[in-house]
Image (cartoon, rainbow, N blue to C red):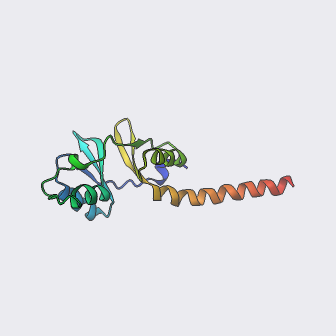
Amino acid sequence: MKVSEAMDEEIVTVDENVSVAEAAAKMREKGKGCAIVLSQCRPVGMVTERDIAYKVAAEGLNPKKVRAKEIMSTPLIEVDPDADLIAAAKIMDEHKIRRLAVVRKGILYGVISALDIARNLEGYVESEVRKILRYAFFMA
C-alpha cells in the first residue's frame, strides 16, 4: 500500500513567524497533532503537540512570544507519496519520529503518522496471510 493511500490530506500549515499560540490554536481548531511550518510557502519544519509541551510549556515560556521556527523540528523529514508504508515506517524508526511530511518536489501532499501506518497495515497483513494460507492449501 502506498503512503498516498493512507496519509491525512487535511494539513495544518503555519508560517514560520507565527507565534506558537497561533499555531496551537490552528492545530486545535482542525483537531490535528501537528502543523507543517512554511518559509516562503515551502515546507521547512514541523511543530507537534510534544514540541509545544516540551519546548514551550515545560520551559515556562510565553507561547505568544515564541515563534514556530524557534521550536519546529527541522529539517523536515519527508516521504514520497508513492513510497510504500513499510518504507515510511522505516524512515520513522530511523529518525525516532511519529509523523512524516508527504512531499514530492517541494510540494506538500499530506502528513502520515505511525498510527495511520498501523491502521492500514493491519488489513494488509491480514490479506497477505490469507493469500499465503490459500497458496499453502493448494500446494498441499
Q: Quadrant of the C terminus?
A: bottom right
Q: Is residue 133 above or below residue 92?
A: below
Say left or right for 79 vs 136: left
Say left or right for 111 vs 134: left
| In-front residue for pair 114/43 | 114
Q: Is residue 1 above or below residue 130?
A: above
- Give how far across and how far down residue 79 sits, in percent: 43, 42
Q: Residue at x 53, y 58 (%)?
A: 120
- Give how far across and how far down residue 62 sits, in percent: 14, 59
Say left or right for 123 vs 82: right
Q: Is residue 66 above or below residue 42?
A: below
Q: Is residue 130 visible?
A: yes
Q: Residue furthest top?
A: 105
Q: Is residue 15 visible?
A: no
- Give how far across and how far down residue 97 sits, in percent: 41, 50
Quarter of the image where one finds residue 131: bottom right
| In-front residue for pair 18/58 | 58
Q: Residue furthest right?
A: 140
Say left or right for 4 vs 138: left
Q: Residue at x 55, y 50 (%)?
A: 1
Q: Residue at x 43, y 45 (%)?
A: 95
